Image (cartoon, coloured by chain):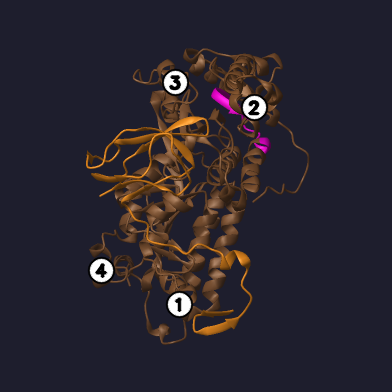
């Protein structure tokens, strides 16, 4: 592959890790994403409701613990993408707030 | 010239330097909400305590017409002063003078004040606000950086080193803060990166803003390169002063003690931790329920929040706290939280600060990303740091302590001096659910109602093994205590450990899993 830095071009071999790396994307601040995989225990809000920063959105089970998801900002719940007892993966969008 | 005239001449020369990069440059600095380098030093140090040196140093650039330019103090202010009466050495790069760029003499001023700090055995605080290497001075500016990094390394573990990022800090310049003990950043003002957005764009085509790449938020939440985040420079200076108040001047002395105080009544320890091990709570309240005046100064508050680290005082003396945080990611250890607490443990050990560890964790975080990020190596740092530390080490198991997590969190086996447990503690090789599934697999599979049998066996295991008494029977924990007795036991343990000596085999140095 060719690598250009400060006006000079280098010919070199890429590593597999470099080729498979995730490209950075501007995160969507409206999306509340799962930081670890888990199972939903209860939903504490509804679509269309007004929420404040720090309000409880849902409770899920992971690592033998009940974990809370709090609203990262003020807004209106646009959608809830999980249901009770649903298993989700890391990175899944759980709730959208606008 | 008479003495009067000579003094007048000196005053004039000083005034010239005090102007820094001139009114226009100062105005520009102010416009983006930044203080000048001198204002920063003055607001950080005790009033009237700052004494400046090397004001009349002249820059060494001779090419590209630079020899005709005057650079006040060569773009950096150095001196000594006090914080709450404690002596410190300090330097502040002056962005108004040639963008705070680092040339040979600029670097010499910094290394000179660093050498002072080492000779005097007092903390050094560096305020970084610089465009980077002074390109006109070529390889001499690189030499300057190298000399600073070398001294950072020699000073590591000898005197506290604090870096304050109050402007850009890019390229090689970032390695000095990275080598120091604590890094402070301010929202919208501080930036740190090895290669900036433009280079990233031309080389690999990724587009990102400076703030998203290396702003204060990114480094205090995502990378962990910053230990403290502040909204304003004033808030940042308050944080630095508070931190300094907990630290010893150097590695041969203890931090200054203050008048002991009882914890505040509002923190009722017996009400803070739910008995059900599945329920979360904020472990910082437990720390505040045992420290003097309920004071807890948290470090890395926003990064890897599943483990909590910071300083508090007990019996007036500084104590380092490490605690799993059930409120965040169930309190698991993962790559980031392992790195976070391992370095803090080594810091406390280097500077004679006793460690109190509060344990409540389900274990290490499972996941492909964790394994592929090298959680084995990172997790091992916690074991290394605890085993290596010879300061008094006290552990309190609040609830869950399973498997590798139990061993890692300053267990007796890593030479904790005292291990206490609450009656709610569950010290076992794994949680009841997992253990029952393995031990009673056959019985569960062959039962008429496997689910009922599974529950029965889980209950059986919980009853027999999910408690502190199995470990207490082996002497792995010293005693089971009532929550109300916690402060009493911790204070006593710290008091009797004060002359602790733990000889170690002779070696040049260990090889921790960096």
- Mark closer to the chain start, 2 or 1: 1
Residue at the disc numbered 2: B437
Please give the count of numbered marks on the rendered protein.
4
Question: Looking at the picture, how far across and down is residue B80, in whole percent?
Answer: 43, 52
Residue at the disc numbered 3: B274
* First to last magenta residue range: B387-402
Residues marked 3 and 2, same chain:
yes
Circles 2 and 1: CB atoms closer than 8 Å: no
Circles 4 and 2: CB atoms closer than 8 Å: no
- Mark closer to the chain start, 4 or 1: 4
Label 2 – label 1 distance at C-alpha: 54 Å
> To which chain does the residue with label 2 belong?
B
Residue positioned most to the front: B448
> Is residue B14 or residue B493 the one in the foreground?
B493
Q: Is residue B53 among what the camera can see?
A: no
Residue at the disc numbered 4: B28
> Residue B505 lies in what quarter of the image?
top right
Residue B444 drawn above or below residue A96 = above
- Determine whether the residue tagged by mark 2 lies in a helix, strand or loop: helix
- Mark closer to the chain start, 4 or 2: 4
């Amino acid at each position: 592959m060719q690598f250009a830095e400060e006006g000079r071009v280098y010919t070199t071999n890429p590593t597999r890790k470099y080729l498979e790396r995730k490209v950075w994307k501007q995160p969507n601040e409206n999306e509340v994403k799962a930081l670890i995989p888990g199972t939903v225990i209860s939903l504490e809000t509804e679509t269309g409701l007004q929420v404040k920063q720090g309000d409880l959105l849902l409770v899920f089970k992971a690592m033998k613990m009940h974990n809370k998801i709090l609203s990262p900002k003020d807004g209106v719940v646009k959608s809830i993408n999980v249901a009770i007892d649903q298993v989700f993966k890391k990175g899944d969008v759980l709730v959208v707030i606008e | 010239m008479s003495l009067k005239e000579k003094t007048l001449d000196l005053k004039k020369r000083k005034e010239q330097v005090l102007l820094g990069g001139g009114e226009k440059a100062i105005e520009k600095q102010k416009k983006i909400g930044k203080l000048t380098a001198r204002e920063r030093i003055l607001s950080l140090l005790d009033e009237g305590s700052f004494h400046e040196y090397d004001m009349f140093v002249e820059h060494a650039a001779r090419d590209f017409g630079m020899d005709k330019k005057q650079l006040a103090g060569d773009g950096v202010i150095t001196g000594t002063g006090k914080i709450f009466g404690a002596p410190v050495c300090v330097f502040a790069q002056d962005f108004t003078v040639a963008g705070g760029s680092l040339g040979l003499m600029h670097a010499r001023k910094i290394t000179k004040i660093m050498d002072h700090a080492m000779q005097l055995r007092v903390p050094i605080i560096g305020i970084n606000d610089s465009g980077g290497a002074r390109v006109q001075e070529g390889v001499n500016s690189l030499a300057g950086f190298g000399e600073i990094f070398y001294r950072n390394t020699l000073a590591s573990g000898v005197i506290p080193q604090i870096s304050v990022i109050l402007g850009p800090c890019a390229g090689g310049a970032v390695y000095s803060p990275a080598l120091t003990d604590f890094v402070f950043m301010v929202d919208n003002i501080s930036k740190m990166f090895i290669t900036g957005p433009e280079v990233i764009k031309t080389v690999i085509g990724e587009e990102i803003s400076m703030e998203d790449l290396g702003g204060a938020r990114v480094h205090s939440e995502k990378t962990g390169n910053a230990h403290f985040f502040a909204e304003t420079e004033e808030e940042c200076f308050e944080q630095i002063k508070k931190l300094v108040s907990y630290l010893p001047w150097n590695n041969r002395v203890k931090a200054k003690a203050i008048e002991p105080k009882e914890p505040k009544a509002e923190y009722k320890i017996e009400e803070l931790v739910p008995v059900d091990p599945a329920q979360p709570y904020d472990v910082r309240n437990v720390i505040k329920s045992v420290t003097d005046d309920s004071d807890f100064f948290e470090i890395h508050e926003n990064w890897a929040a599943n483990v909590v680290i910071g300083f508090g005082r007990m019996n007036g003396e500084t104590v380092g706290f490490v605690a799993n945080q059930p409120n965040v990611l169930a309190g698991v250890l993962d790559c980031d939280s392992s790195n976070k607490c391992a370095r803090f443990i080594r810091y406390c050990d280097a500077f004679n600060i006793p460690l109190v560890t509060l344990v409540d964790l389900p274990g290490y975080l499972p996941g492909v990303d964790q394994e592929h990020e090298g959680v084995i190596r990172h997790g091992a740092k916690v074991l290394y740091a605890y085993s290596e530390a010879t300061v008094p080490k006290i552990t309190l198991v609040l609830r869950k302590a399973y498997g590798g997590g139990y061993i890692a969190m300053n267990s007796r086996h890593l030479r904790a001096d005292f291990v206490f447990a609450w009656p709610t503690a569950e010290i076992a090789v794994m949680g009841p659910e997992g253990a029952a599934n393995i031990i009673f697999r056959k019985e569960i599979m062959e039962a008429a109602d496997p689910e009922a049998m599974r529950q029965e066996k889980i209950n059986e295991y919980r009853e027999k093994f999910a408690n502190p008494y199995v470990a207490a029977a082996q002497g792995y924990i010293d005693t089971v205590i009532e929550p109300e007795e916690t402060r009493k036991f911790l204070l006593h343990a710290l008091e009797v450990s004060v002359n602790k000596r733990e000889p170690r085999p002779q070696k040049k140095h260990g090889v921790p899993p960096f």
